[in-house]
Amino acid sequence: MNAINFISLQVKCPHCSKSLMDDINFIDNEPSIKLLVESEGKSGTLNLSSIYGSYNYLSDLDFKENSVSKFSCPHCREELNTTDKCKTCDASTVTLILDIGGKVSFCSRKGCQDHNIGFEDLSVALKKMYLDFEQGTKVKFKQEDIVTPEKVKVKTESELHKEIIESGSFLNVYCPHCNKSLIDDEMLKLRIVNEKKEEGYIMLSPYLNVFSSKSTIYLPEEKELSDIKCYHCDKSLKLSDTKCEKCGTSIAKVLVGARTKMIDFFICSKKGCTWHGLSKRDLDDIRLEDSNEW
């Protein structure tokens, strides 16, 4: 997989050099970028997705479409808007410093999607990005994961013959209606409709238990998607009679190619929920490593 598709930017203030990363408020399942913001005479905080190319955010302010905001560092309070103009709409741009060297800039106008990233040394930056991505796919073990003699359970004959899909495995995903692949540019691509009935695309990591994502439209955290569709045949993938076992939200079904057969694979339609599972008929043959099913 191309790591830059889901690169999570680590940024700091260009004035005081302090980190702007928020490890408490996650967006797109990654730590967000926290900034102070002023818009239409009101002040508040804004948390941006750290996934490059994602336009999702959290804020205690409502932003009018096309409004221009002033951004500041939450540590030193220095303004982050620069004198550089957006090439798309001519509003001021906001520039942050990348931990890996270089800078990232984005437009201060609501609704404008102009942004760019520049590296001081591209080869060094790319090497670090790929290293960070590879480390992010590894499972982090907890104390309860350590196997002790008293935790050992004798497996039944059927369990010994189950196929185990390990964390980090690339999933070949298909539409259950037209059977076409949903993998595009090494990402799982789905057509989506948000609560405002706006349509766009969401790109999910196709690696099991790696939950990076980005979307072409705004998706509020903890909100259910109105619909999830195949981007080929445009048919809905949501199920009307089955709910997420973790949060009770409706779920969507896709097909995943396992070693022995095609299996039904379910994902939650709520932004931020990481639940996923298999159909009961597949549980006799397949096991997802570290899944909520186990």
Image (cartoon, rainbow, N blue to C red):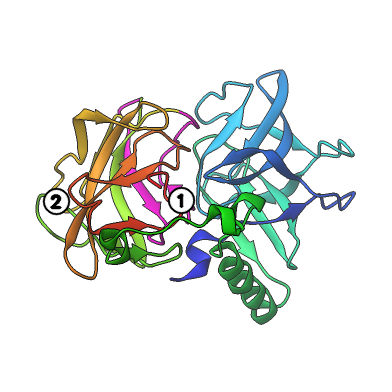
Which mark sits nearer the N-terminus, 1 or 2?
2
Instruction: Give the answer, above or below, for where 40 lies relative to 176.
Output: above
242 vs 87, left or right, is left
Depth check: 5 or 153 in front? Answer: 153
Would you say residue 147 is visible in this rendering?
Answer: no
Labelled disc at residue 213: 1
Depth check: 75 or 276 in front? Answer: 276
Label 2 sits on a secondary structure element that is: loop
Identity, as a three-letter code, of the amino acid under mark 2: Pro
> Is 216 in the magenta?
yes
Which residue: 56% across, 61% down?
Answer: 139
Distance (Cα) linking label 1 and label 2:
22 Å
| Extent of the magenta region | 196-222
Identity, as a three-letter code, of the amino acid under mark 1: Ser
Which residue: 62% across, 62% down?
Answer: 117
Would you say residue 268 is visible in this rendering?
Answer: yes
Badge 1: few (under 14), some or many (20 or more) residues near its Cα, within 10 Å?
Answer: many
Instruction: Give the answer, above or below, for where 141 lies relative to 21.
Output: below
Label 1 sits on a secondary structure element that is: strand
Query: Tags 1 and 2 in contact by the CB under 8 Å rule?
Result: no
**Quadrant of the frame with the N terminus:** bottom left
Depth check: 282 or 269 in front? Answer: 282
Image quadrant in which you'd find residue 178: bottom left
Which residue: 17% across, 61% down?
Answer: 262
Labelled disc at residue 278: none
How many numbered marks appear? 2
Q: Which residue is mark 2?
A: 176
Foreground mark, 1 or 2, reads 2
202 vs 141, left or right, is left
Q: Position of residue 191 (x, y in %)?
A: 27, 45
> Is 252 in the magenta?
no
